[in-house]
Image: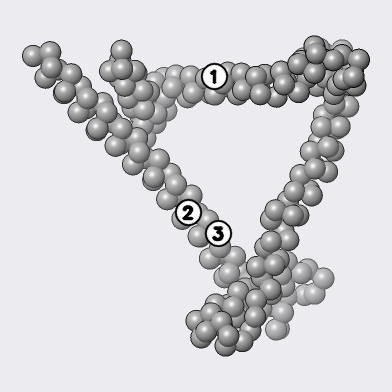
Amino acid sequence: MNLLGIWIASFLTLCIFSFLYKDNPFFRFAESLFAGVSLGYYIGQEADQTIRPNLIEPLRTNFAGNWDLLIPALIGVNLYTRYIPKANWWARWSLAIYVGYYVGVNMVQKLHGEVLPQMQSTVVPLSLSAGPMGLLNNLILIAGVLSVLIYFFFSLEHKGAVGLTSRVGIWFLMLGFGAAFGYTVMGRVSLLIGRLNYLITQWAMGTVDALGRLL
């Protein structure tokens, strides 16, 4: 049974790899299966870990004390009116509330989790107390931040010193984009190595071992 699962996983992996040749029915089958399984798993997780403990259980155990939970429940159910042609505009109200709530909550989290720590990391000392290399790194960091900010400052015409600084900012941006792209490529290559390792060690070697035991 374990070997059967390995063969199914290996077959689906090869179906995905077949896209390297061209689009084909095997790739579309594996892609659709992956999307369907992922969606089903996500719905199950949401129902079991979000809707049941936060809505169903409080209403079931203490309806009088938690009746106000019906309001967000109705707002959520109202999203599905978009599938009713004559009442699909009702879903806009729920969508507007959801987007406004998400932006309000997420904005505070982003400020405290990303913007403020990044600003704090940008304020670095320009002294030899950090060592020669540390001082050089801090100078490069400050030059990069200032030049990139000037590149996005459009209230002044980008010519002369401003234009030269903005061009330096473009180089820093390209370096940042290149590093991000390289990090993404490394992640994809790591996934590819993992799948190739699975095909060799689990599928090929596992099948050989199973045949050896049978013979």
Quadrant in the picture for residue 157? bottom right
The image's mark for residue 36 is 1
> For the residue marked with disc 3, what is the amino acid?
Phe
Residue pointed to by mark 2: 183
Q: Could one spot residue 119 in this view of the protein?
A: yes
Proximity of marks 2 and 1: CB atoms separated by less than 8 Å: no
Secondary structure state at the residue bearing disc 2? helix
Q: Amino acid at mark 1?
A: Gly
User: Extreme bottom residue here?
Assistant: 128
Secondary structure of the residue carrying tag 1 is helix
Screen quadrant of the C terminus:
top left
Q: Which numbered disc flags the more N-terminal residue, 2 or 1?
A: 1
Q: For numbered disc 3, what is the local secondary structure? A: helix
* Alpha carbons under labels 2 and 3: distance apart: 10 Å
Q: Position of residue 174 (x, y in %)?
A: 55, 64
Looking at the image, residue 50 lies above or below residue 1:
below
